[in-house]
Image (cartoon, rainbow, N blue to C red):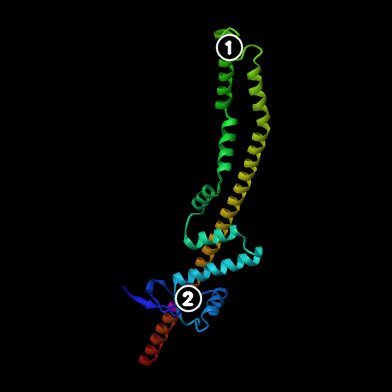
């Protein structure tokens, strides 16, 4: 396989990745020349090296637009650099961030607001009353008017308000997390589109340059043919 040495890192790359500095946009070329002042438009670099500076250019543009980069912005940029899927990373981070209390709150809220809890509690009340009235004939551990049962229901009612508040707090946290995820996914989509524009612009410039080279060769051939015709005449 034919290779070349990059004028940036002096590393060996396949010749298919060779990019001329003439085809690099000025903003990105300026970034390259900050790190490598000796690099000029007549030199070559690899496509992977160019992509690194494209990402730096986009990161710098984002920092100018929003000011200081937040942790969300940094996570998106890291995902862009690593070529990883952002949604999978967010799911893993969310599971790692949840505390024991938050997990318990999620389970309590999901069970307490379900038909399973309502039906189960209804069956429990029916069995309690039936056991004391019909089976033990009001001589059991909680005869009519069911003082112990009323105590249990009062305790549940007292705990109900904190449970509802806990559920609402967890729902608000989930809504905030969902908004953050939407922002990060939208931001990554925007950055990916910018990268795509950069690559398309590069392909267009490269193609135009190749067409110009072909035209130059054709003009030279035509000139040679005209000179030969003149000599023959």
Q: Alpha carbon of mark 1 to alpha carbon of mark 2: how far?
A: 97 Å
The front one of 168 and 62 is 168
Numbered mark located on residue 27 in the image: none
Write the start and end of the magenta stretch as one range.
206-215
Q: Is 207 a magenta residue? A: yes
Residue at position x 56%, y 46% in the image: 99
- Quadrant containing the C terminus is bottom left
The front one of 230 and 101 is 101
Q: How would you rate the neighbour count of disc 2 (Cα within 10 Å): few for under 14, some for 14-19, many for 20 or more?
A: some
Residue at position x 42%, y 81% in the image: 217
Q: 8 left or right of 153? A: left
Residue 57 spot, x, y in % from top left: 56, 69
Residue 174 spot, x, y in % from top left: 61, 44
Q: Badge 1 is on which residue?
A: 140
Q: Badge 2 is on which residue?
A: 209
Q: Main secondary structure of the magenta part?
A: helix
Q: 122 left or right of 16? A: right
């Amino acid at each position: 396989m034919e290779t070349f040495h990059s004028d940036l890192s002096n590393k060996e790359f396949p010749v298919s990745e060779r990019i001329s500095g003439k085809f690099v946009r000025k903003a990105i070329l300026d970034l390259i020349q900050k790190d490598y002042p000796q690099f000029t438009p007549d030199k070559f670099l690899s496509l992977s090296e160019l992509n690194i500076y494209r990402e730096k250019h986009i990161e710098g543009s984002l920092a100018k637009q929003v000011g200081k980069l937040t942790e969300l912005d940094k996570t998106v940029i890291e995902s862009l650099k690593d070529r990883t899927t952002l949604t999978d990373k967010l799911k893993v981070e969310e599971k790692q961030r949840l505390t024991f209390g938050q997990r318990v709150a999620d389970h309590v809220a999901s069970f307490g607001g379900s038909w399973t809890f309502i039906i189960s509690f209804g069956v429990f009340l029916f069995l309690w009353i039936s056991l004391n009235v019909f089976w033990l004939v009001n001589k059991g551990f909680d005869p009519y008017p069911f003082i112990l049962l009323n105590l249990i229901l009062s305790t549940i009612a007292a705990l109900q308000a904190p449970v509802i508040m806990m559920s609402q707090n967890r729902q608000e946290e989930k809504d905030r997390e969902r908004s953050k995820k939407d922002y990060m996914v939208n931001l990554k989509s925007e950055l990916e589109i910018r990268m795509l524009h950069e690559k398309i612009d590069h392909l267009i410039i490269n193609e135009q340059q190749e067409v110009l080279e072909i035209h130059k060769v054709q003009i030279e051939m035509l000139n040679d043919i005209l000179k030969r015709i003149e000599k023959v005449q």
